[in-house]
Image (tube, rainbow, N blue to C red):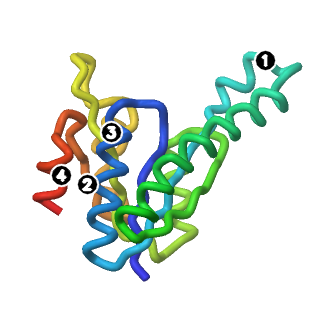
Amino acid sequence: MRKFLVVLDDSRECLNAMRYTAYRAAHTGAGIVVLAVISQDELQHFMGVADVMRAEARERIEAHFEVFAKWMRDKQGVDPQLIVREGDAGQEILNLVAEDPQIGILVLGASIEKGGPGPLVTHMTRNAGTLPIPVTIVPGDMSKERLEAIT
């Protein structure tokens, strides 16, 4: 089964990326892999409490994921899979794509802030020519209705 890969983070644009992914997966019969990455930088600054911080980050990620997962299951009929990793988000995306040949499309949400589309979108688009899968970038300010219409 083909899978969509979407990144879960605390950004506003993450919501649209999740919605788009759920709509597309529901319409195409695909699966969804949700990747959350805990930055090593966060943990290294506080070496003495790294395990506590790691556990807290994981709890926050799982709670955030469950909100999206419940909506995806109840409203779209898809059951997403959560994968939590530690490291650099860009590298962890590449690692996961290499490990799971069923992942066929990466979906990212683009920020509408003046600073650009966001570090992950910037990183992935700079390297788009060498990525093993296509990338779909979802505008952060696109309405729910428009997302439904285009999927």
Residue found at x 20% / y 46%: 144
- Whichever of labels 1 and 2 marks the residue nearer the N terminus, that label is 1
User: Mark 1: which amino acid?
Assistant: Phe
5 horizontally vs 143: left or right: right
Residue found at x 43% / y 69%: 78
- Whichever of labels 2 and 3 marks the residue nearer the N terminus, that label is 3
- Circle 4/circle 3 CB separation < 8 Å: no
Q: Residue 59's spot in the image, x, y percent?
A: 70, 39
Q: Residue 70's spot in the image, x, y percent?
A: 49, 56
- Whichever of labels 3 and 1 marks the residue nearer the N terminus, that label is 1
- Circle 4/circle 2 CB separation < 8 Å: no
The residue under label 4 is 147
Query: Distance from label 1 to label 2 (Cα)?
Result: 35 Å
Query: Distance from label 4 to label 3 (Cα)?
Result: 19 Å
| Rendered position, 132 above or below 102 | above
76 horizontally vs 34: left or right: left
| Rendered position, 105 above or below 10 | below
Numbered label attached to residue 136: 2
Residue 61 image-quadrant placement = top right
- Whichever of labels 4 and 1 marks the residue nearer the N terminus, that label is 1
- Other residues around mark 2 within 10 Å, as few (<14) / some (14–19) / many (≥20): some
Numbered label attached to residue 121: 3
The residue under label 1 is 46
